[in-house]
Amino acid sequence: MARITTSDEFPCPPSVIFGSIVDLSKWSAFQGYGPLPGIREATLPEGEQLGLGSRVRVLNTDGSVHHEVVRTFEPHRKYSVVMELSPPAAYLMNRIEEDIELAETPTGGTRMTRTFITVPRSLLTAPLVWLLTHGLLRKAVFRHNRLIQQELR
């Protein structure tokens, strides 16, 4: 298992950040990093709204598909998913977990803390998963956080 955590401050209230997180049309702002793919499109089945238990279909920029199952949905406070991976990521990892916590700052902004846990498929893949998590995934998340900050300014 590998874990990374980022923490960034945004100049708007938690309700705005949460709204951006749950807006599937904005998920394509996640660009990935190097060979780690970004998101091309995120969709739900026709007529379904994002909420606890939702299973979001994610088309990645490399053409692969994974699903993100919402396991925490507390508006303006917490959002978390478990990513059900498909090849090629599934060859290395069982799953990725993402937890987002939002806290209002004294200035009325938001502190967003994102934690990613990657679970390797085996002891053989664990070192590579650790490198991917602490290298490519960390850089992709930092880039994504910067893009969110720019959009919300």
Image: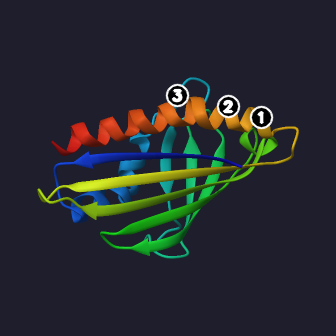
Asked whether, in this view, residue 111 is left or right of residue 123, the answer is: left
- Farthest residue in the top direction? 34
Asked whether, in this view, residue 132 is left or right of residue 32, the answer is: right
Q: Do labels 2 and 1 touch, CB within 8 Å?
A: yes
Where, quadrant-wise, is the C terminus in this rendering? top left
Residue 33: which disc? 3
Residue at 32% in and 36% down? 146
Residue 127: which disc? 1
Residue 131: which disc? 2
Residue 122, visible in the rendered structure: yes
Give SS at disc 3: loop
**Which amino acid, by three-letter code, is at mark 1?**
Pro
Residue at 44% in and 65% down? 79
Mark 3 is surrounded, within 10 Å at the Cα level, by few (under 14), some (14 to 19) or many (20 or more) other residues, namely: some
Residue 22: which disc? none
Q: Position of residue 25 (x, y in %)?
A: 37, 51
Give SS at disc 1: helix
Most foreground residue, 153 or 101: 101
Residue at 50% in and 41% down? 39
Residue 37, visible in the rendered structure: no
Asked whether, in this view, residue 100 is left or right of residue 54, the answer is: left
Label 3 and label 2: CA atoms lie apart by 13 Å
**Which amino acid, by three-letter code, is at mark 3?**
Tyr
Q: Do labels 1 and 3 touch, CB within 8 Å?
A: no
Marks 1 and 3, the one that precedes in the sequence: 3
**Which amino acid, by three-letter code, is at mark 2?**
Leu
Q: Does residue 70 lie above or below 32 as drawn?
A: below
- Farthest residue in the front direction? 106
Residue 125: quadrant of the picture: top right
Residue 137: quadrant of the picture: top right
